[in-house]
Each structure stands twice: as structure tokens, then as C-alpha cells.
Amino acid sequence: MSVQDISLEAFSQLARSIEAEVRRVIVGQDDVVRGVLICILASRHALLEGVPGLGKTMLIRTLADALDLKFSRIQFTPDMQPADITGTDILEDSEDGRTKVRRFQPGPVFANLVLADEINRATPKTQSALLEAMAEKTVTIASRTYHLEPPFFVLATQNPLEMEGTYPLPEAQLDRFMFKVNVSFPSLNDLVRILDRTTGVESPEAAKVADGAQVMEMGRLALNTPVASHVSEYVARLVLNTHPDTDGAPPLVKQFVRYGASPRGAQSLILGAKCNALLEGRFNVSFEDVAAVAPGALRHRLLMNFEGLAEGVSADAVIADAVKATPKTR
Amino acid sequence: MAAQSLSDNRAVLLGIVRRWDRRDRVRQSVFWAPRAALPGLAVGVVLALIARFRPFLLPETIAAITLALVAAGMLASLAIIWLRDRSLLRAARRFDVLFGLNERVSTALELLDGRIHTQPELAARQLEDARLTAREVRPRDQLPLRAGPVELLALLASSAALVLLLVLPNPQSDAVALEAAQNAAVQSAIEEAADAVRDLTAQVAADPDLSDEDREQLLQTLDASAQSLNDPNVSPEEAFAALGESQTAFQQVSDLMQQRLGENTRAMQEASEALRDFAPPGEGSNLSDVERMLRQMEMMRQLAEQMGGQPQPGMGEAMQNAGQSLSQSGDPTLQQAGDAMQQAAGAMQQGDQSGAQQSLNDAQNALEQAQQQQQGQQQAQQNAQQGAQQAQQAADQLNQAQQAQQGQQGQQSQQGQQSQQGQQGQAGQQGQNQQQGRGEGQSQGQSGQSQQGASGEQNGGQQQGAGTEAESAQGNQPGALSGAAVRSQGAGAGDNAGGEALASQGSGPIEANNNPDGVGESQYDAIYAPQRIGGQPGSEQIFLQQDSEDGQVVEGEFGPNPNGAATVPYNQVFRSYANAASQNLDTGYVPLSLRDIVRNYFTSLEPRN
């Protein structure tokens, strides 16, 4: 199936179907669903952060069900080894039984949709095992490189509260996630609906509405969404304004940010805005698209300084200030 | 087909954006018009307020300035709004934000311009989406033609305030109008003076009786005066000074010529006296000295011929004395005649009949030539005197206009009452009459010293009707210079006529050691002569005439004045005279050492009531 084979109508239909199927299982969390879907359409990775029990794992599993993708879940623990993720060579009898041969046993990373649950509980060594897979979409073991079958997404979760015995992700690894999606506690109505939906005899399940190939084609189409030059300049100015040394940086950035977003953050903004525009039924990227994806794209890329950490200033507040302070035209 | 569609979309989108842009410029014009007009109105209100507290500008002028500023402000705002170059792409970006179009139009224009690219289907859908969305925009709703209410209120308030300030009676308006009229009169007088100087220059350049040296001196002075008067920024004082310099130059030339003529006349009188025994019988007393001498010499030549070479006793000696008198004159022609007469006397004494006849003929020829020269010099002297008079008349006109203006200003500053303007004008008119009288006296003084005294009496009679003693003394001064000095002093000089100081100083020649330091001799300008000439340096006492204690100041309308008495109350004319003196003190033409004397003089004359 080529890019031309999927029309804009098909894209809109598939996107609406995916979101509809997810919402059959997941109550509320529209922004979370939209954020994760954007990451999937852009063939990038997402990091979901929230306290336990908010449905992070359920959301990812439901997405996997709706997209008919090969799904694997890795529950990160402190004693987990890299081979537990990537796989390893094992010795087994040859077919004639006369010799022993070495055979690669793929790990759980060899899937289309990988759920890295509580990724911050693994040691950095194990966490880094995902680096190559996330960046290069390959796995190298014993001098052999194995390509991961596209599409490949890593959707990781982490718990922000239980910090004891955890290993926070280093900035380099955080930067590989396109979005960091905050999963908030549901509202009263949403909670009631969750209770109704999950405490009965039957649990809703998502139907498969798209396969991997369609997802990839949707992603390619989304990446073709035109971006006006002044919108691109706005994104660049916005990212620069997250750096405290920039002249136009807003006061919160100057006061509480130690280091701003990377160029990869700007890329994530454009990619996310493109997908968001198409999901909104538009065929061009607007400032609103950029503003909509800015928190998810930038919040894990801002390094707060000591004052910001001590004051408890959230990255979202800083980003909102930067969005507000950045002029849309020169 | 696709290209046609793209072209259509582009034309449609560009047309829509242009329409929005025009609407936006109209909206900005309406919005900024009151703001652009406000500064001009504010300036107008400030000017109108200032004009209410002091003579500043006429209401018409303020209105014109305000209108000009308002128009300039609005034109500037319109120029900025309509001439500002804004590309359609920039306009589209702005309208995307303004109309909430989510960058549809600007993205479409960039796609059409090839600035950005995407796959054709997506581009076509985007363009179609942008076109449809743009057509749904209602510019009249999004860009209403409204001015800010605050600006409108400020505009109305400023306009109302300005109209009130301009329409309501302004006590300063009459003063401003009068000042403007007087300034125009002064300027007109300066222009007339410049014309007079131009005419004088032409006359001097064409005068054949003037010597080259005198002509050059007069032309230089007149050129300098003409330059000053033609200067557009010349002040009345500078114009007056330039005219005064011209008048002085003419007068000096005239005096020099008069002196030369006097010397020649005296020499010929002495020579004629020496030859009185040889006057022909029945000679008329109305002959001039030259004619008389020519007849005497003719008589002597006939006697010598009749006596056959034996001259009549005393003839040679008389001829010798007459020749010596003529030789001592400064005129070369007369000297030549004197030398010839002395040679004739020597020839007679030696019995050289033919030599004596030849010398007598030479002397007669030289005398005839001297007679012609004397007539030319008299004509040149009269021309110079006439030039001085013309310059003086121009200065008088200028002075009259300036005095009228100063009298009005002084009245405004001191009394500020409209009712006194007529009286002040009356005083100015009287001063004008006095100056004209002095001009006549000057012209009469040219013909002889005896007439100068008469003109002085005429001046005194016109001014105060007193002080004949002083006027006769003044008549002994060089007439033209004295007259010029009195005129340059203005109306204030008229009071000097009654002072005893003038009587004590009324002597003719300048005495030795007349410098203020008591050493040496100095030639003073005649304007200061009454205080200096003839008096002892440093010891001069000036006794000023005081008004009597019981003197009644009469005001009001006056009927015919058959007795020639002063009909204007003293306290009314004093201020204009004092102002004239003060102005001359300020212009710097009065030496520092003498200014206190002038000030004290007018202080002593100040009316007591």
C-alpha cells in the first residue's frame, strides 16, 4: 500500500475509529489518548507519567488491540537485565541432533508496540538497552544487528510518586520520547463511568480497526501536512524562548529553567502539530496546533534549576508562559 | 486542469486578501483620524489660551495654524496607513490571526507561491479549505469602521474648547491687530526709505559737479545704507541708523563745499577790497565778488593803456595786494589768478606794458574760470544738501511710523486702556509736525547763517512756544548739522529749547580744551553740542526748567489755537518724548558718558502727577 493509497477521508475515518475504539475502553483522558495517538502516527515514542491505577497500561493495551499490532509488555524491575528486553543467544541442538547451535531468542522489544511499564524502576544499564531500539529501531547482540519490524513504538510509563528505589531516566533518553504525557486523575463523572464500566460482568474491548501498514501510511500522510514558514519560525522562537539565555525568554524561563528544549523538541512540536492538524480535520498547521502539543513535546525537555525545583514550579507553567510570550509574527 | 485550479484558487485568495487589506486600511484610517487630529487641536487650544493672556496671535491666525496642524496630522496618518508597504502574504498572516483562520490563507498562499511543498492532493485540499473558509469571513463584522470613544470625546472636547476660545471676545485681539498694522507701517516706511536711498544713489552717480572723491564717499555710504535697508531682517533702529549715516555723509560733503566756497569768497572779497580804488563808476552793489574783480581789472587795464605805459600811482601795489590775497586761497584757479595779478603788478612797476597786459589778461581768464567753478560748486553743494534733506525725510517717515508703534506699546504697557490710543496718536501727530518744521528750518539754514536763526525760532514756536534765546544761539551753529541732530533726537529735543544751558552754550567756533578730560580739542557731534560747546569741561551746570507748582494740566478737546500756545497737555506728550530718548540711548548712538545726563534730564522733566 503506497502513500497515495490512503486518502484524507480514509485518514480521518481511521483516526476517528481508533479514538472511538479506545474510548470504548478508556473513560475520559482525551488529551492522553490524543497525545499517544499522535506519537503513534508520527512513529515516535511516548512516555506516560501518572500515579498507579489511572489506566496507563490499559490505554496502551487498548491501542494495541485497536491497531492490530504485535504488542509486548515489559514490566521493568531493578533486577532486570538488558537481555531480558532485547533477547539473547541460546544454545540448542541442531536439527540432526549431533551438534549444538546458537540461536537468537528475541526479547520483548521485538514487537510493534512495546509497553515499558514503570521504566524508571530498571537500572540505567537496562534502560539504555532500549536506547538503540528507540533511536535506530535495531537491536545489536553479539555483533549481530537485528532490525525491528515497523511500525515500532515504545510507550513507557513511570510513577512520579514512588521515587525510592527508582532510576530517573537520563535526559538523553528522555529526549528520545516524542511526548511526555501526563495522566491526570479522572474527574468525578469520569470516575463514575469507570466504575460502571469496569465493575460489571463484561468488560469492553476494543475492536481492531487498523493494521500496522495503515498506521504507517497515516503517519506518512500526516508528515506531509504543510506548515507555513511563519509557523515554523514560531516553533523555532518558542523553543529558543525556553532557554534562559535567550533575549526574548519570558520571566519564568529566565528564573526557573536551567536548560531549555533541544532541537529534537522543535521537531517533536512540528510533527505533533502536523498530526494534530489532520486529526482536527485541517490540512495545514496552525499556531493552535503548536500550542496544543507544546506541553507534551517540551515538558520532559526542560531542565529546571534548583530554584525551580525548590519552588515546585511545573514545566507546564513555564511552557505556557513561553507560548504566551512568543510572538506569532516578527 | 490541476494548474487551472491552482491559478483560480490563487486569484480568488489574492482578491480576498486584497479586499481585506483595503477594508483594514479604511478601518485604521477611521480609527486613527481622531488621534491624528488631536495634537493639532491641542496645540490650537494652547495657542488660544496664550493669546488670551497676552498679545500673541489673532484668532484667525490661530484657527489657520490649528487647521494646518490637524490637516498635517491626518495626512501623515493617512500616508502612513495607505503608503505603508505590506505584502499580501504578511497581510494574510495578519488576517489569519485576526479572523481565527488557523493560518489557512497564509499557508495556501505559500503553497501557491512555492515557498512550501506537499503532496498534490493535500495541497489541493488545503487550498480548497482555505478558499472556502476565507469566503465565510465577514470583513464588515470583523473590521468595523469605528473610532475609539475616548478619542472621539477628546476630539469633541478639544474642538469645542478651541471654538469657544476663538469665538468669545478676546481683549488682546485689538492690541495684536494694531501691532500688526503698525509693524506693517514700519516695514512700509523702511521700504520707502530704501527707495529714497536708491534714488539718491542714482542722483549722486550722475552728478557732474561732485568731485570724484566726494562722489566715491557718498556712493559708499549710500551703498551701505541700501544694503542695510534691503536686508529683510533689518530692524527699524538699524534702518534709521543707515539713513542717518547717509544724511550725515551728504551733510559733511555739503559742509566741506560750503567751507571751500566761503574761503574763496573771503579771498576774493579781500582782493576786491584791495582794488576798490579802481572800481568803475556806477558799479552796482549787487555784483558778485568775481564780477566786481573782473570789472576792476578791466578798469585797470584800460587805465594802463590810456597812460601809455605809465601806470597810475598805487595801481601796482593794489594789484600786488590783490594777487597775494588770491594766492593765499586754497583754490588752484584763484591761486593762478593771484599769481598772474602779481606778475602784472611787477610788470607795471618795471614799465613793461605788454607784459602787464598779458598778465592781466591771464588773470582775467583765470578769474572767469574761477567764476564758472564757483557756480558749479554752489550747485554741487546744493545738491548734497538736497540729498541730506531727502535722507532726512526718509528717516523722518520711518521715525514717525516707529514712534506711533512705540507710543502704542508704551500705552499698552503702562495703562492698557483703549481710550488713550487716540490721545497717543494725537501726540504722535504733533511730533510729526514738529519734525517737519525742523526740516524746513534746515533747508533755510543752507542759504545763510542769518536764516538759521529764524528757522530755530520756528522750531521753538512749534514745540513749546518758548526759549527764543536758546534758539538764536542754536542758529549760530552750523545749520545743517544742528538741524539733523535735532531731528535724530526726535520729539524729545524740542524741550531743550527752553533750557538755560543752551543759551550759555550758544557760541560759534569750537574752543580749545573742550575735551571732557580737559586736554586737547575735540569735534563733537552737534547733537551733544548744547551741553559741551562753549562750556567749561566738568563744570557745566544744567538748570532745567520746571513746571510751576500751580500749573493746571488741561485735558480734553481743544479749539482753535490763535495764540500758538501748546494745546496738548504736558503729561501726555512727555512719555512719547521720553520713550524716543530712551530708544536712542538703547541703540547705542549716545556715548556712555553722556547717557546719564540724558536720563537725568528726562527724569527731572517727569510730570509730577
Image (cartoon, coloured by chain):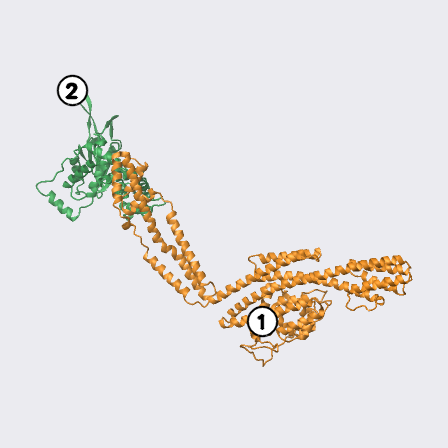
Task: Compare residues B463 and A127 and report the one nearer the observer.
Answer: B463
- Residue sitting at 17 percent across and 44 percent down? A28
Numbered disc 2: what chain? A
Q: Amino acid at mark 1?
A: Gln
Of the 4 image quadrants, the one containing the N terminus of chain B is top left
Residue B216 falls left or right of residue B35: right
Residue that carries the numbered disc 1 in the rendered image:
B430
Q: In the image as oriented, which residue stretches furthest toward the left?
A: A201
Task: Compare residues B424 and A204 and report the one nearer the observer.
Answer: B424
Residue A64 falls left or right of residue B235: left
The colour one sees for chain A in the rendered image is green
Q: Position of residue A160 (x, y in %)?
A: 22, 43
Helix, strand or loop under label 1: helix
Q: Position of residue B320 (x, y in %)?
A: 86, 62
Looking at the image, is B383 positioned above or below residue B102?
A: below
Residue B90 falls left or right of residue B534: left
Task: Compare residues B55 and A307 and report the one nearer the observer.
Answer: B55
Q: Position of residue B606 (x, y in %)?
A: 58, 74
Helix, strand or loop under label 2: loop
- Chain letter for the orange colouring in the rendering: B
Q: Position of residue B258 (x, y in %)?
A: 72, 63
Task: Compare residues A63 and B573 and report the one nearer the observer.
Answer: B573
- Residue sitting at 90 percent across and 65 percent down? B313
Looking at the image, is A265 positioned above or below residue B313?
A: above
Numbered disc 1: what chain? B
Residue A207 falls left or right of residue B277: left
